[in-house]
Amino acid sequence: MFTNKQVFKEAFLNKLASIRGKTLQEASPMDIYLAFGKLIMDYTSKNWAQTNLDYKEKEARQVYYFSMEFLLGRLMGQYLVNLGIREVCQEGFKDLGINLEEVESLEPDAGLGNGGLGRLAACFMDSLASLNYPGHGCGIRFKYGHFEQKIINGYQVELPENWLREENVWEIRRADKAVEVRFGGNVRMEVVEGKMVFHHEDYEPVLAVPYDVPIIGYDNKTVNTLRLWNAEIADNDFDFPSFTHGDYLRVIEYKRSVEAISQLLYPDDSHHEGRVLRLKQEYFLVSAGLQSIIRTYKKKSRSLAYLHKKVAIHINDTHPALAIPELMRILIDEEGMGWNEAWSITTETISYTNHTILAEALEKWPVDIFKSLLPRIYMIVNEINERFCGQLWNKYTGDWQKIREMAIIADGYVKMAHLAIIGSYSVNGVAKIHTDILKKYELKNFYEFYPYKFNNKTNGITHRRWLLKANPALSDLIIECIGTQWIKEPEGLIDFLKYRSDSSILARLEEIKRNNKIKLAEIIKQNNLVNVDCDAIFDIQIKRLHAYKRQLLNALHIMHLYNRLIENPDLDIVPRVFIFGAKASPSYHYAKNIIKLINSIALKINDDKRLKDKLKVIFLENYRVSLAEAIIPGADVSEQISTASKEASGTGNMKFMMNGAVTIGTLDGANIEILDAVGSENIVTFGLTDREVLTFYHHGGYNSWEIYNSDERIKNILEQFVSDFLPAPQGEFTTIYNSLLHNNDEFFVLKDFAPYVDAQNRIDKLYKNKQKWTQMCLVNIAHSGRFSSDRTINEYAREIWNIKPFTSK
């Protein structure tokens, strides 16, 4: 326990000497970082061990959260905040001539996620531990993460995200808890004592080795576990005779194929090998995780007939949906249960969150790939499908079309969302509008068949990272005004609302925002070599690059502003700095083309002296959690402009409002609930509604040429895209041009352009009244507590998982 800085300094110097063999004078910055990390782990280990022991001894009901992504960001700073030792460590380091922030900056962002799905999982892990819930994460230890993004000549270039280059101080390898996962081969059946028995033979074995990461609760003794699985070759599976007899290539290829499973998040599935690898990853995750859970459960000599009473398994989107047939396999093949008993246990144990209505994200696998790679699992899925279709026939006799639409296996594909719904006891959406769309449109047939399964759990974010850690100056002001109770009860932030007319608090809030903008401007200068005006509006859109998120609409508006300023350099507008951060999937060429477009616009605008610095465009490369923590506190405007009905929830909108940014957004996802919270006077909304969008889709879209021919602003901008106006190769943006005009503008960019411009004009007018604007910021902060992941997790715990808080000794 670091009771004071002297105790800390002595402990740190001892740790530095013991694990690095160096004095402070000899130590490199990395030596200091690693020694400090080990010291934090030592500090944590007792509570971690005690938490695990208490859960086992008291037989607490536990939830296991399966997710392909856990976008953790950097852990050191969050650990220090949650442990309550940041100040004493900072003071002790200062005495030693060490800057704590510089030490923290040496930690790489963990390469375990890509976007909102993974960040949500990370926020949930923090809330589970901070609220004393027995809940753990289960994922894959990706060696190279998604990718590191470089912007070269305006183009996205992908490099390996080698986040494990140095030792990861936060993980502990548990080789003794490794399990075997089997791929390929064939299944032999035989009848033994009147019962069908299945033998999986001639399979390819893969060793799944767990690496455990502590998840430290805030100001308590709870330390839960994030278990990450690494794919390896077992010593007894290494073909030494073949290697010594010169068949090196076969042995090396086998080793490569095994290790590839845990190398890269979301391999390119546009080709056969990539699809096989992605399916391998999904089964590897659930098989390893479930085997581990069952083994732990059986140590108490309990009957597996009661598994669902002590264990809740949650699948985050469709990636872990194979947990359903894998649990059936374990219960039937390894535990000797009959089908009905195993199915009853499975469907009372597993719950499912749906994150999207996009067809491309509702996974489906070709039967030939699935059956070849997972022969026994395919047999079980096929049996689930046959029994389910039998139920459908009893209810919808003769309606072959409905049965085909709802089947798990149809048209040569295995449909994972259907499997997840049928095999779960709960199916939840992640915002009110998203859940309504699932019920009324995308999953209407399933909702009518299983109305009791469907429910809503609006997403949330951990305020301990996104406010307390990311914006300490704002946190200190809030604490000064309303105390500290909001840190544990975030809806208490509403008490900050009583200061909305306090001129001195508003002035300090404005000063904090400007200081955060100055810090962000320094990052921009360092990375992009562009000076920006900190009195300008910082208008920010940071999120995964996808057509439905409509970074393209933002770019069209920027071009519109540019054209207005060229026509009238003295135009009376508040200067703007438009800031983007986004990665596009390596095989998503359209999204990558939009990145090139944004960077070409930036090159055109940033060097144009005629604009008198009224307009700047910045694309910050390699968007990640640690960069978001630096960007979000400096935002004035939060761009949440997805096509209505497409964004399931969004969590960036919550992070921005919590840090005092004003949302400009469509009536989509959680934007609607933010509007309900803050009122229409504290958010700027525009555009088509979800009902209007879905109606257009139902009738084949709209005629984008009509808008092109009737709006000179749009016509001019689009012609600039395909002329030599922008500094890019001729024809570079023809695909974008064609998508808007010749391919019917799938995401209604042109349809929403005029309302978006009007909304941006409202932003300009509002910002000119700085007191009114700062009041809007304060109102957003005060209402942000309801969007904490603490609220979300309490709802999951109460209404889905049936788990209760558990306090360790």
Image: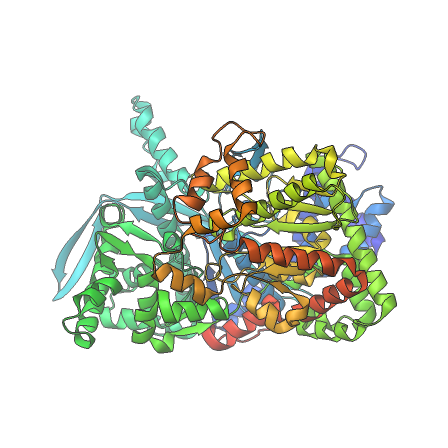
Write the residue at 78% across / 76% down: 498
Write the residue at 81% across / 51% down: 515
Pick whichever, 514 or 203, lies toward us.
514
Percent position (x, y) of residue 257?
36, 36
Percent position (x, y) of residue 30?
70, 37
- Figure disc tally: 0
Pick whichever, 547 or 58, lies toward us.
547
- Position of residue 540 relative to residue 313, above or below, is above
Write the residue at 84% across / 66% down: 505
Percent position (x, y) of residue 282?
38, 51
Residue 216 in sight in this render: no
- Position of residue 477 relative to residue 578, above or below, is below
Pick whichever, 649 or 132, lies toward us.
649
Q: Is residue 96 left or right of residue 634?
A: right
Q: Quadrant of the C terminus?
A: bottom right
Write the residue at 35% across / 63% down: 420
Percent position (x, y) of residue 501?
82, 72
Q: Is residue 556 left or right of residue 138?
A: right
- Position of residue 236 relative to residue 463, above or below, is above
Residue 329 in sight in this render: yes
Q: Quadrant of residue 555?
A: top right
